[in-house]
Amino acid sequence: MASAPETEAFTPEDIFILSGQSNMSGRGGVDKHNHWDTIVPPECCSDPAKIFRLSAHLNWEMACEPLHHDIDTKKTCGIGPGMSFANAIKDKMGAIGLVPCAVGGTALKEWGKGTHLYENMIKRARAAMHQGGKIKALLWYQGESDTLFKHRVETYKANMEKLIHNVRADLYMPFLPIIQVAIASGEGKYIEEIRRAQKRIDLPNVVCIDAMGLQLKEDKLHLTSEAQVKLGQMFADAYLTHFAATKHSSVHSSVKRSFFCCCLN
Protein backbone atom coordinates (compact mmCIF):
# COMPACT_ATOMS: atom_id res chain seq x y z
CA MET A 1 0.00 0.00 0.00
CA ALA A 2 1.33 3.47 -0.90
CA SER A 3 1.88 5.81 2.01
CA ALA A 4 0.06 9.10 2.28
CA PRO A 5 2.15 12.25 1.71
CA GLU A 6 4.06 13.41 4.76
CA THR A 7 3.18 16.82 6.22
CA GLU A 8 6.43 18.68 6.80
CA ALA A 9 6.95 20.59 10.08
CA PHE A 10 3.37 20.21 11.21
CA THR A 11 1.80 18.95 14.43
CA PRO A 12 -1.97 18.54 14.83
CA GLU A 13 -3.52 20.31 17.79
CA ASP A 14 -5.76 17.52 19.08
CA ILE A 15 -4.17 14.08 19.38
CA PHE A 16 -5.85 10.74 20.00
CA ILE A 17 -4.08 7.46 20.72
CA LEU A 18 -5.70 4.38 19.14
CA SER A 19 -4.64 1.18 20.85
CA GLY A 20 -5.59 -2.39 21.69
CA GLN A 21 -5.86 -5.34 19.32
CA SER A 22 -7.35 -6.26 15.95
CA ASN A 23 -10.79 -4.68 16.27
CA MET A 24 -9.03 -1.37 16.88
CA SER A 25 -6.48 -1.77 14.12
CA GLY A 26 -9.36 -2.85 11.89
CA ARG A 27 -10.35 -5.94 9.93
CA GLY A 28 -13.39 -4.44 8.22
CA GLY A 29 -13.49 -5.50 4.57
CA VAL A 30 -10.77 -8.13 5.00
CA ASP A 31 -11.87 -11.53 3.65
CA LYS A 32 -10.96 -15.04 4.81
CA HIS A 33 -8.02 -15.01 2.41
CA ASN A 34 -6.65 -11.91 4.15
CA HIS A 35 -7.36 -9.58 1.25
CA TRP A 36 -8.80 -6.13 1.93
CA ASP A 37 -11.57 -5.14 -0.47
CA THR A 38 -10.30 -1.49 -0.50
CA ILE A 39 -13.86 -0.18 -0.01
CA VAL A 40 -13.78 2.94 2.17
CA PRO A 41 -17.15 4.01 3.62
CA PRO A 42 -17.96 7.71 3.22
CA GLU A 43 -17.70 8.18 6.98
CA CYS A 44 -14.07 7.01 6.81
CA CYS A 45 -12.85 9.20 3.95
CA SER A 46 -9.70 11.26 4.25
CA ASP A 47 -9.71 14.98 5.01
CA PRO A 48 -6.28 16.39 4.11
CA ALA A 49 -7.02 19.65 5.91
CA LYS A 50 -8.21 18.19 9.22
CA ILE A 51 -7.23 14.55 9.87
CA PHE A 52 -3.67 13.26 10.13
CA ARG A 53 -1.91 10.13 11.36
CA LEU A 54 1.48 9.45 12.89
CA SER A 55 3.31 6.97 10.68
CA ALA A 56 5.51 4.13 11.91
CA HIS A 57 8.47 6.45 11.25
CA LEU A 58 6.96 9.12 13.53
CA ASN A 59 6.04 11.52 10.76
CA TRP A 60 2.69 13.24 10.38
CA GLU A 61 0.85 12.45 7.15
CA MET A 62 -2.65 12.63 5.79
CA ALA A 63 -4.75 9.94 7.48
CA CYS A 64 -6.33 7.32 5.26
CA GLU A 65 -7.54 3.76 5.60
CA PRO A 66 -6.17 1.40 6.72
CA LEU A 67 -4.84 3.53 9.55
CA HIS A 68 -2.75 0.71 11.05
CA HIS A 69 -1.20 -0.63 7.84
CA ASP A 70 2.38 0.05 8.98
CA ILE A 71 1.77 -0.71 12.68
CA ASP A 72 -0.15 -4.00 12.79
CA THR A 73 2.03 -5.52 10.09
CA LYS A 74 1.66 -9.27 10.66
CA LYS A 75 -1.96 -9.29 9.46
CA THR A 76 -3.93 -7.48 6.78
CA CYS A 77 -5.58 -4.35 8.10
CA GLY A 78 -8.84 -2.91 6.84
CA ILE A 79 -11.45 -0.53 8.21
CA GLY A 80 -11.25 0.30 11.90
CA PRO A 81 -13.05 2.90 14.05
CA GLY A 82 -10.43 5.64 13.89
CA MET A 83 -11.40 7.48 10.71
CA SER A 84 -15.12 7.34 11.48
CA PHE A 85 -14.35 8.76 14.93
CA ALA A 86 -12.21 11.58 13.55
CA ASN A 87 -14.73 12.56 10.90
CA ALA A 88 -17.50 12.62 13.49
CA ILE A 89 -15.68 15.09 15.76
CA LYS A 90 -13.64 17.17 13.29
CA ASP A 91 -16.05 20.11 13.10
CA LYS A 92 -15.70 20.61 16.85
CA MET A 93 -11.91 20.24 17.03
CA GLY A 94 -8.71 21.68 15.66
CA ALA A 95 -6.54 19.62 13.34
CA ILE A 96 -6.81 16.00 14.53
CA GLY A 97 -3.81 13.71 14.90
CA LEU A 98 -4.44 9.97 15.17
CA VAL A 99 -1.69 7.82 16.68
CA PRO A 100 -2.30 4.17 15.69
CA CYS A 101 -0.71 1.68 18.12
CA ALA A 102 -2.98 -1.40 18.08
CA VAL A 103 -1.67 -4.87 17.27
CA GLY A 104 -3.90 -7.85 16.59
CA GLY A 105 -3.95 -10.98 18.72
CA THR A 106 -2.41 -9.33 21.79
CA ALA A 107 -3.41 -10.16 25.36
CA LEU A 108 -3.48 -7.50 28.06
CA LYS A 109 -0.29 -8.85 29.67
CA GLU A 110 1.54 -7.95 26.45
CA TRP A 111 0.70 -4.29 27.11
CA GLY A 112 2.31 -4.19 30.55
CA LYS A 113 4.87 -1.52 31.35
CA GLY A 114 8.28 -2.54 29.99
CA THR A 115 6.92 -4.64 27.12
CA HIS A 116 7.61 -3.71 23.50
CA LEU A 117 3.97 -2.85 22.82
CA TYR A 118 3.65 -0.58 25.83
CA GLU A 119 6.95 1.21 25.34
CA ASN A 120 6.26 1.73 21.63
CA MET A 121 2.85 3.22 22.44
CA ILE A 122 4.43 5.64 24.93
CA LYS A 123 7.21 6.50 22.47
CA ARG A 124 4.67 7.27 19.76
CA ALA A 125 2.49 9.31 22.11
CA ARG A 126 5.47 11.42 23.20
CA ALA A 127 6.56 11.92 19.60
CA ALA A 128 3.04 13.07 18.73
CA MET A 129 3.24 15.79 21.40
CA HIS A 130 6.79 16.82 20.56
CA GLN A 131 5.94 20.00 18.67
CA GLY A 132 3.10 21.20 20.84
CA GLY A 133 0.06 19.01 20.19
CA LYS A 134 -2.04 17.85 23.14
CA ILE A 135 -3.27 14.32 23.72
CA LYS A 136 -7.03 14.49 24.21
CA ALA A 137 -7.80 10.82 24.88
CA LEU A 138 -6.71 7.21 24.58
CA LEU A 139 -9.20 5.05 22.66
CA TRP A 140 -8.81 1.41 23.71
CA TYR A 141 -10.36 -1.76 22.28
CA GLN A 142 -8.82 -5.00 23.56
CA GLY A 143 -9.79 -8.14 25.43
CA GLU A 144 -10.74 -10.79 22.88
CA SER A 145 -7.50 -12.72 23.44
CA ASP A 146 -8.05 -12.67 27.20
CA THR A 147 -11.27 -14.68 26.88
CA LEU A 148 -9.21 -17.84 26.38
CA PHE A 149 -8.12 -18.44 29.97
CA LYS A 150 -9.78 -18.05 33.35
CA HIS A 151 -6.65 -16.69 35.03
CA ARG A 152 -6.62 -13.82 32.55
CA VAL A 153 -10.21 -13.02 33.46
CA GLU A 154 -9.37 -12.97 37.15
CA THR A 155 -6.57 -10.43 36.69
CA TYR A 156 -8.06 -8.36 33.86
CA LYS A 157 -9.61 -5.52 35.87
CA ALA A 158 -6.52 -4.98 38.03
CA ASN A 159 -4.18 -5.17 35.05
CA MET A 160 -6.26 -2.74 33.01
CA GLU A 161 -6.39 -0.26 35.87
CA LYS A 162 -2.61 -0.62 36.25
CA LEU A 163 -2.16 0.03 32.53
CA ILE A 164 -4.20 3.22 32.81
CA HIS A 165 -2.17 4.40 35.81
CA ASN A 166 1.10 3.66 33.98
CA VAL A 167 0.10 5.47 30.80
CA ARG A 168 -1.04 8.53 32.71
CA ALA A 169 2.15 8.57 34.79
CA ASP A 170 4.50 8.12 31.84
CA LEU A 171 2.77 10.86 29.84
CA TYR A 172 2.51 13.15 32.90
CA MET A 173 -1.25 13.37 32.35
CA PRO A 174 -2.95 12.14 35.55
CA PHE A 175 -6.45 12.77 34.20
CA LEU A 176 -5.96 11.59 30.61
CA PRO A 177 -9.39 10.56 29.29
CA ILE A 178 -9.70 6.88 28.46
CA ILE A 179 -12.54 5.53 26.31
CA GLN A 180 -12.51 1.76 26.34
CA VAL A 181 -14.75 -0.77 24.62
CA ALA A 182 -16.61 -3.64 26.26
CA ILE A 183 -15.91 -6.40 23.74
CA ALA A 184 -18.49 -7.91 21.40
CA SER A 185 -16.65 -11.18 20.72
CA GLY A 186 -13.72 -13.28 21.82
CA GLU A 187 -11.36 -16.09 21.03
CA GLY A 188 -12.46 -18.14 24.03
CA LYS A 189 -15.45 -18.88 26.24
CA TYR A 190 -15.01 -16.12 28.84
CA ILE A 191 -16.49 -13.25 26.82
CA GLU A 192 -19.08 -12.21 29.40
CA GLU A 193 -16.54 -12.40 32.21
CA ILE A 194 -14.14 -10.06 30.39
CA ARG A 195 -17.02 -7.71 29.59
CA ARG A 196 -17.96 -7.55 33.27
CA ALA A 197 -14.36 -6.79 34.21
CA GLN A 198 -14.24 -3.98 31.64
CA LYS A 199 -17.47 -2.44 32.87
CA ARG A 200 -16.28 -2.58 36.50
CA ILE A 201 -13.15 -0.51 35.95
CA ASP A 202 -13.59 2.35 38.38
CA LEU A 203 -11.22 5.23 37.74
CA PRO A 204 -11.79 8.94 37.06
CA ASN A 205 -12.05 9.96 33.39
CA VAL A 206 -12.62 6.40 32.21
CA VAL A 207 -15.67 5.78 30.04
CA CYS A 208 -16.80 2.41 28.70
CA ILE A 209 -18.79 1.99 25.48
CA ASP A 210 -20.42 -1.31 24.57
CA ALA A 211 -19.77 -3.02 21.24
CA MET A 212 -22.18 -5.89 21.90
CA GLY A 213 -24.76 -6.00 19.14
CA LEU A 214 -22.52 -4.59 16.45
CA GLN A 215 -22.32 -6.81 13.37
CA LEU A 216 -19.53 -9.38 13.21
CA LYS A 217 -17.92 -10.89 10.16
CA GLU A 218 -18.22 -14.59 9.32
CA ASP A 219 -15.33 -15.34 11.67
CA LYS A 220 -17.57 -14.23 14.60
CA LEU A 221 -14.61 -12.30 15.98
CA HIS A 222 -14.05 -9.14 13.95
CA LEU A 223 -16.38 -6.24 13.26
CA THR A 224 -17.60 -5.54 9.74
CA SER A 225 -16.83 -2.23 8.05
CA GLU A 226 -20.37 -1.03 8.80
CA ALA A 227 -19.95 -1.95 12.46
CA GLN A 228 -16.60 -0.16 12.62
CA VAL A 229 -18.25 3.01 11.29
CA LYS A 230 -20.84 2.77 14.09
CA LEU A 231 -18.16 2.09 16.67
CA GLY A 232 -16.21 5.16 15.60
CA GLN A 233 -19.36 7.22 16.02
CA MET A 234 -19.90 5.71 19.48
CA PHE A 235 -16.34 6.74 20.42
CA ALA A 236 -17.13 10.22 19.12
CA ASP A 237 -20.38 10.49 21.09
CA ALA A 238 -18.59 9.39 24.26
CA TYR A 239 -15.75 11.86 23.76
CA LEU A 240 -18.01 14.80 22.94
CA THR A 241 -20.38 14.00 25.81
CA HIS A 242 -17.83 13.45 28.54
CA PHE A 243 -14.67 15.32 27.63
CA ALA A 244 -14.87 17.82 24.76
CA ALA A 245 -16.98 20.38 26.64
CA THR A 246 -14.31 20.85 29.31
CA LYS A 247 -11.36 22.90 28.17
CA HIS A 248 -8.00 21.18 28.77
CA SER A 249 -9.86 18.14 30.07
CA SER A 250 -6.95 15.86 29.16
CA VAL A 251 -4.74 17.56 31.76
CA HIS A 252 -6.70 19.32 34.47
CA SER A 253 -10.22 18.00 34.86
CA SER A 254 -11.82 14.84 36.11
CA VAL A 255 -15.18 13.26 35.51
CA LYS A 256 -16.55 10.34 37.41
CA ARG A 257 -16.08 7.00 35.67
CA SER A 258 -19.20 6.06 33.76
CA PHE A 259 -20.65 3.40 31.50
CA PHE A 260 -21.79 4.93 28.24
CA CYS A 261 -24.01 2.87 25.92
CA CYS A 262 -24.85 4.17 22.46
CA CYS A 263 -27.97 3.23 20.56
CA LEU A 264 -27.13 0.92 17.68
CA ASN A 265 -30.04 1.98 15.46
Image (spheres, rainbow, N blue to C red):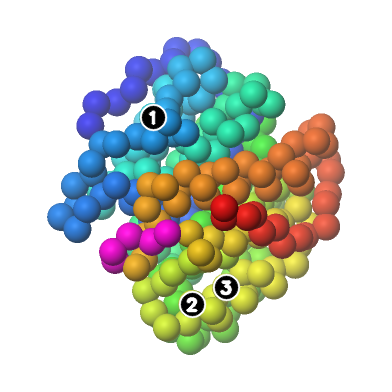
Per the model, the C-alpha gap separating discs 1 and 3 is 31 Å
* CA neighbours of label 3 inside 10 A, class few (<14), some (14 to 19), many (20+): many
- Which quadrant: the N terminus? top left
Residue 5 is left or right of residue 121, and the answer is left
Horizontal side of residue 65 vs 125, given as left or right: left
Percent from the top left, x then y, of residue 182? 57, 65
Q: Please name the residue that numbered disc 2 is placed on.
A: 191
Which amino acid, by three-letter code, is at mark 3? Arg
Q: Is residue 165 visible?
A: no
Q: Main secondary structure of the magenta part?
A: loop
Q: Is residue 52 above or below residue 164?
A: above
Residue drawn at x 58%, y 34% as measured from the top left? 88
Image disc number at residue 64? 1
The answer to which of 21 and 56 lies nearer the viewer is 21
Q: Earlier in the sequence, mark 2 or mark 1?
A: 1
- The residue sitting at 54% across, 75% down in the picture is 194
Which labelled disc corresponds to residue 195?
A: 3
